[in-house]
Amino acid sequence: MILNRCIRIGQILLFYLMLLWLGGMLLLGNIVVLPLILTPKSVRRPVVQYCIGAICRVFLSGASACGLMRLDLAALDTLNRERGMLLVPNHPSMIDAFLVLSRVPRAVCLMKASIGSNLFLGAGAYLAGYVPNRHPERMFRTAIRRVCAGDLLMVFPEGTRTTQQPVNAMQGAVALIAKKAQAPLQTILITTNSAYLSKGWKIWRPPTFPLIYRAVPGERIAASDSLATTSSALQQYFEGQLTRSIDPALTL
């Protein structure tokens, strides 16, 4: 009992140190890449995307080495060879973008506008060319143009973190972008054993360790002229593949 308590205390202290380390890397990264704002987009975007991916990968690798996480993400590496498509993961927790970007740094995120003013994420996201959702019409035009230019656009088709297992209802935005860009939707199946950073979970609230995350490419779905048909195909696929995206019984 005493040994278990000591282990738990040690894990929590290490967990807080890891979060501080992540915050420091993100803040320093924003400062380091800021001068790139003077360079052309064609130069700065791939450089900053690589830096963001490297920070995600270093953090996850560190957490794994410390025993706080167990990860199965390597299958995502195959997506680095692709061009001009949408990456559509399910979204059980806030860490999902980190999981994908750590292996597919070329991915361009469709992001919440509030991230643009975030001290730790804003400058990097802007310089990487991520697409904010502040103005919907501009967002759609930019997203479609980027996919047509060959970018991998990552969009969470649920629109928010999962609150209804295994996935929420699919939103129409992803289907519209895919239709207009005439691009396929590459599904990504994310599962975890923990509700950490799920809807309503604060980042500083420690979970039970180890956190387990698996992310693998799923089926590639062709966009239909009917938005409802595309959304329905995504819904049926995710529900058919996932019993639960947050499954306490998940092991690696």
Image: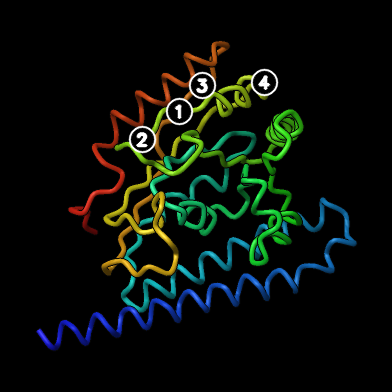
Dot 4 amino acid type: Lys
> Seen from this angle, which residue lies furthest left?
1
- Residue at the disc numbered 4: 180
Secondary structure at badge 4 equals helix
Which of discs 3 and 1 lies nearer the camera? The answer is 1
Dot 3 amino acid type: Ala
Measure how far apart labels 3 and 2 are at the Cα level: 20 Å
Which of discs 4 and 3 lies nearer the camera? The answer is 4
Q: Are marks 1 and 2 in contact (CB under 8 Å)?
A: yes
Dot 2 amino acid type: Val
Numbered tag placed on residue 222 in the rendering: 3
Q: Earlier in the sequence, mark 1 or mark 4?
A: 1
Q: Are marks 3 and 1 in contact (CB under 8 Å)?
A: no
Q: Quadrant of the C terminus?
A: bottom left
- Residue at the disc numbered 2: 167
For label 1, count other residues whose C-alpha is less than 10 Å away and answer few (under 14), some (14-19) or many (20+).
many
Q: In this image, 179 relative to 33: left or right?
A: left
Residue shown at 63%/51% (left/top)? 106
Measure how far apart labels 3 and 1 are at the Cα level: 16 Å
Q: Earlier in the sequence, mark 3 or mark 2?
A: 2
Dot 1 amino acid type: Met
Which residue occupies the foreground of this view, 86 or 95? Answer: 95
Numbered tag placed on residue 170 in the rendering: 1
Measure how far apart labels 2 and 4 are at the Cα level: 25 Å
Q: In this image, 80 relative to 122: left or right?
A: left
Which of discs 3 and 2 lies nearer the camera? The answer is 2
Q: Earlier in the sequence, mark 2 or mark 4?
A: 2
Q: Is residue 101 above or below residue 149?
A: below
Q: Are marks 3 and 2 in contact (CB under 8 Å)?
A: no
Residue shown at 66%/60% (left/top)? 118
